Image (spheres, grey):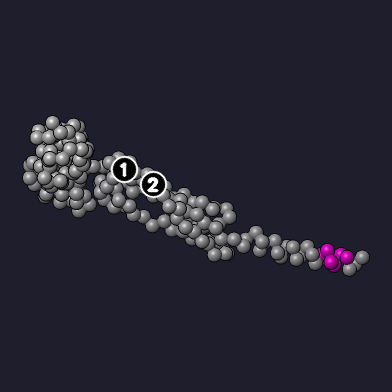
């Protein structure tokens, strides 16, 4: 099973039904202590209400909490017509952190928007980490 | 009288022969290890484990995993 959506302890029960009259329900358990190697804070960026024509920026801290250097090979924001992100690909030493600037430039339409910033890494088990973005665009 | 004893004896013998079959004719699920601890795992890494299930009874064992 994937540990992608876990950042701490994982506990999973698997229930097996059998025709054994003395054990018609068997419960199997799996557990793991999941730890982050790439920490992103916050994981959800909420711009709140943004007026059309006004550009807003929010910062996200990205930290390498592993004991090895970690490469962010690609940084991509979607929808690209509304969101931009800096800096470009970079390398984090063990313990090092970098602040990402996520910029929102509302388009012509108002209403709620959702997007994300995707960080691609050189880790085989964590090829991508996603930061979710939300905003409510209001006409001036 | 002698015939009655023989009949009762025969019935007891028949019951003794049948009873063990009645009590043992059932599937029996045996799982040596029901818990798996993967230890410390970095986020994103897949974890997998094979749970072994053996039928130690004398009837076919059927099973299905209950959906989450």
Looking at the rendered image, the disc whose residue lies closer to the viewer, 2 or 1, is 2
Residue A67: x and y, percent? 17, 43
Looking at the image, residue A53 lies above or below residue A129: above
**Mark 2 vs mark 1, CA separation in Å:** 12 Å
Q: Which residue is mark 2?
A: A12
Q: Which residue is mark 1?
A: A33
- Counting other residues with Cα less than 10 Å from the Cα at mark 1, is it few (<14), some (14-19), or many (20 or more)? some
| Viewer can see residue A96 | no
Question: Dot 2: what SS?
Answer: strand
Tell me what residue is drawn at x 7 percent, y 45 percent. A88
Q: Toward the viewer: B68 or B7?
A: B68
- Around disc 2, counting alpha carbons within 10 Å, would you say few (fewer than 14), some (14 to 19), or many (20 or more)? few
User: Was residue B15 drawn as part of the magenta stretch in this picture?
Assistant: no
Q: Is residue A104 left or right of residue A9?
A: left
Q: Secondary structure at mark 1?
A: strand
Q: Is residue A61 left or right of residue B66?
A: left
Q: Is residue A92 above or below residue B54?
A: above
Q: Nearer the viewer, residue A37 or A128?
A: A128
- Do the dots labelled 2 and 1 sit on one chain? yes
Q: Residue at x 25, y 49 (%)?
A: B44
**Magenta-span inclusion, residue B5:** yes
Q: Residue at x 22, y 52 (%)?
A: A125
Q: How many marks?
A: 2
- Point out the stretch of residues depicted in magenta: B4-9
On the image, the x and y values in percent for residue A129 come to 20, 46
């Amino acid at each position: 099973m994937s540990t992608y959506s876990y950042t701490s302890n994982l506990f999973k029960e698997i229930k097996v039904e059998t025709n054994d009259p003395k054990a018609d329900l068997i419960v199997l358990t799996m557990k793991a202590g999941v730890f982050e190697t790439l920490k992103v804070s916050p994981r959800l960026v909420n711009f709140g209400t943004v007026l059309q024509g006004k550009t807003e920026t929010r910062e996200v801290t990205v930290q390498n909490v592993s004991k090895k250097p970690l490469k962010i090979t690609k940084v991509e924001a979607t929808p690209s017509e509304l969101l931009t992100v800096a800096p470009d690909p970079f390398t984090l030493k063990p313990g090092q952190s970098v602040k990402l600037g996520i910029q929102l430039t509302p388009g012509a339409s108002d209403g709620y928007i959702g997007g994300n910033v995707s960080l691609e890494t050189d880790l085989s088990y964590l090829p991508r980490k996603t930061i979710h973005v939300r905003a409510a665009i209001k006409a001036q | 009288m002698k015939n009655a004893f023989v009949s009762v004896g025969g019935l007891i013998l028949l019951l003794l022969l049948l009873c063990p079959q009645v009590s043992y004719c059932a599937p029996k699920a045996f799982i040596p290890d029901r818990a798996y601890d993967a230890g410390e795992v970095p986020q994103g890494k897949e974890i997998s484990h094979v749970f072994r299930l053996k039928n130690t009874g004398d009837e076919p064992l059927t099973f299905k995993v209950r959906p989450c």
